[in-house]
Image (spheres, helix red, strand yellow):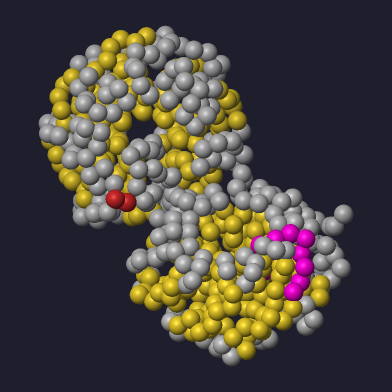
């Protein structure tokens, strides 16, 4: 067995994913009673994010299917998270491992909202169960403390009155609000003031009122104890459906967020508008959630962006947290290594400051769908995507330029010959060379290309294929001549020349990473690099050409040593429950990884 050093790595940063959003569906943010963090879900993960510095994040990944909602207990010591299978997991916030306290299955379908009682002893969950739409139970034992019934369609929202006498309210797709008294909780009445789905019900922190919001654009205010209607807020509150409401901690104001791309702040006593926040003009600017925590007013746009509203200047947010909420498919670095570029399944490109993790979205017209290649070259970054085009980002302006080269088929990767001013692209059915903005050469191929890398010293191009071959071509002026074919035991998934141009590394679907010396394209050593348990997706070189990192479908990153081929470091569960999609080295001790989980992670690795 090869030697292994433990622990030879640490996770320095997580550049967390944004909330996963769906058009026409509200999402729920969770508030930390201690005021430090906030919560949301993306895929199987719960993201715990620092509210003052959103670059600090933690990810909980123990659910086996997609999570819809997570909420802190009033004590702040536990979080309850609910998923699409109807499971609730209650886990601790104190330990780094987030130890599981209990797991329950209160309903047989997606959970849409969770609320804790003020004494931390009871939880109500609502959603789309097969035999019932909600359940209220004891957090310690899971025993039922009443029945959530009386509404005929799935429940979207629920809340516990924070003061005694306890009440529960629920908002349903049958356009009604259910009111329950207890414990044990029994159905008391329905309120039928809304004419469309009720999307949010929330008690004021002092328990005096509760507010409801619906897709009819209306927001109603009710007495917290009797559930009598006090009146309508606004007339109506919004021009589009209202997705969420959030109370000011002193219960005097209410924040609403709407599909009409605005958020509004209301005076509860007069039920009149205080401020309107216009969040934009595109569909992506619809507001699908809001949270009021301390002095922070947070909203979530359909794009996934998290906005910090500025009450003193509603014209623009204090801060917008950007990133990805779809799987990341490309990863690159600017030439000076100061900026990391990530691109996702939906064509969004984000730049990250490699020092502090601050980020911004790249503007302009990009690919609009999945990206398969990215590479920096001087003042520009080049990208290719499944819209069959090569495009260019101006680094300084942080926007796509009008440079577009249309390709004949789907590109799978790109590589740059800087001195020759040539971009080489591996496409599904051909290899293409682009000079300036023109296609100067194309070579039809009988295999499907997966990846491409260029050697600026030898002017060789290596192309991975789905037919278990790695092919080397020579650049001859503006043409490519076949040179040699190297056999693998599985489809070649990625390949990369070392920065010193002396080695070529390739990985394949047969779980292998193979190192070749460029001189004769023979294996550089007789050690087999085969410690992955599944297809290897990506390989990357350290700047000094001494280490190779590989990332796999098995969620693992392995660091391999060129000088000591029998030594390696395994980073297990680098992206738990998520395959590794891309890797890049920031410096000789720092690896950056991206995953299907939409997160980007920065790892510090000891030299092997």
Q: Farthest residue toward the bottom?
A: 477
> Which picture quadrant has residue 211?
top left
Q: Residue 143, percent across and down?
A: 53, 13
> Which picture quadrant has residue 430?
bottom right
Q: Residue 506, percent across and down?
A: 71, 67
Q: Quadrant of the N terminus?
A: bottom right
Whether residue 123 is visible: no
Query: Does the segment drawn in magenta span residue 487?
Result: yes
> Would you place residue 456 above or below residue 31 in this image?
below
Residue at 23% across / 44% down in the picture?
Answer: 260
Residue at 60% across / 48% down in the picture?
Answer: 578
Q: Residue 602, percent across and down?
A: 58, 59
Residue at 76% across / 72% down in the picture?
Answer: 486
The front one of 79 and 186 is 186
Q: Quadrant of the C terminus?
A: bottom right
> Would you place residue 61 above or below residue 187 in this image?
below
> Would you place residue 533 above or below residue 86 in this image?
below
The front one of 423 and 178 is 423
The front one of 114 and 36 is 114
Whether residue 315 is visible: yes
Most prominent secondary structure in the magenta stretch? strand
Please indicate whether residue 240 sits to the left or right of residue 47 in the image: left
> Which picture quadrant has residue 5?
bottom right
Give the magenta part as a residue range: 485-495
Q: Residue 208, percent across and down?
A: 25, 22
The front one of 109 and 134 is 109
Query: Does the segment drawn in magenta span residue 199?
Result: no
So how many labels did they put on this image? 0
């Amino acid at each position: 067995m090869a030697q292994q050093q433990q622990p030879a790595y640490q996770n320095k940063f997580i550049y967390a994913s944004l909330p996963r959003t769906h058009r026409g569906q509200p999402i729920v943010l969770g508030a930390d009673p201690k005021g430090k963090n906030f919560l949301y879900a993306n895929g199987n993960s719960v993201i715990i994010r620092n509210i003052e510095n959103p670059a600090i994040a933690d990810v909980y990944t123990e659910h086996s299917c997609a999570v819809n909602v997570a909420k802190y207990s009033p004590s702040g010591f536990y979080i309850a998270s609910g998923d699409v299978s109807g499971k609730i997991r209650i886990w601790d916030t104190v330990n780094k491992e987030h130890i599981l306290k209990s797991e329950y299955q209160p309903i047989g379908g997606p959970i849409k909202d969770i609320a804790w009682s003020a004494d931390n002893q009871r939880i109500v969950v609502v959603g789309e169960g097969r035999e019932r739409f909600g359940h209220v139970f004891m957090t310690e034992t899971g025993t039922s403390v009443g029945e959530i019934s009386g509404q005929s369609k799935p429940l979207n929202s629920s809340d516990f009155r924070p003061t005694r006498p306890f009440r529960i309210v629920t908002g349903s797709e049958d356009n009604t609000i259910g009111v329950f008294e207890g414990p044990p909780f029994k159905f008391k009445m329905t309120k039928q003031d809304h004419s469309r789905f009720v999307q949010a019900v929330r008690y004021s922190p002092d328990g005096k009122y509760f507010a409801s919001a619906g897709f009819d654009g209306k927001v109603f205010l009710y007495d917290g104890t009797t559930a009598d209607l006090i009146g309508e807020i606004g007339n109506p509150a919004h021009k589009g459906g209202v997705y969420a409401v959030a109370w000011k901690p002193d219960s005097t104001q209410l924040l609403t967020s709407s599909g009409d791309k605005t958020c509004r702040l209301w005076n509860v006593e007069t039920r009149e508008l205080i401020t309107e926040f216009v969040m934009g003009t595109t569909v992506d600017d619809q507001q699908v959630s809001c949270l009021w925590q301390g002095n922070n007013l947070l909203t979530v746009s359909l794009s996934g962006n998290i906005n910090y509203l500025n009450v003193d200047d509603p014209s623009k947010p204090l801060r917008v947290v950007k990133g990805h909420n779809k799987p990341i498919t490309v990863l690159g670095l600017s030439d000076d290594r100061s900026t990391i570029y990530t691109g996702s399944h939906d064509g969004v490109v984000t730049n990250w400051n490699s020092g502090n993790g601050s980020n911004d979205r790249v503007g302009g017209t990009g690919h609009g769908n999945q990206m398969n290649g990215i590479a920096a070259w001087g003042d520009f970054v080049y990208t290719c995507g499944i819209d069959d085009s090569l495009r260019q980002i101006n680094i300084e302006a942080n926007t796509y330029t009008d440079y577009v080269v249309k390709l004949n088929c789907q590109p799978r990767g790109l590589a740059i010959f800087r001195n020759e001013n040539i971009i080489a692209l591996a496409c599904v059915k051909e290899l293409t060379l682009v000079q300036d903005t023109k296609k100067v050469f194309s070579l039809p191929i009988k295999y499907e290309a997966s990846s491409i890398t260029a050697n600026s010293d030898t002017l060789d191009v290596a192309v991975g294929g789905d037919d278990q071959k790695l092919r080397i071509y020579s650049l001859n002026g503006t043409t490519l001549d076949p040179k040699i074919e190297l056999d693998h035991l599985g489809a070649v998934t990625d390949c990369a020349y070392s920065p010193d141009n002396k080695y070529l590394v390739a990985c394949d679907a047969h779980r292998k990473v193979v190192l070749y010396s460029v001189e004769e394209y023979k294996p550089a050593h007789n050690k087999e690099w085969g410690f992955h348990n599944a297809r290897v997706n990506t390989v990357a070189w350290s700047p000094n050409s001494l280490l190779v990192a590989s990332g796999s479908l098995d969620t693992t990153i392995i660091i391999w040593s060129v000088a000591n081929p029998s030594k390696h470091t395994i980073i297990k569960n680098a992206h738990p429950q998520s395959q590794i999609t891309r890797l890049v080295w920031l410096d000789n001790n720092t690896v950056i990884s991206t995953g299907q989980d939409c997160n980007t992670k920065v790892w510090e690795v000891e030299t092997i």
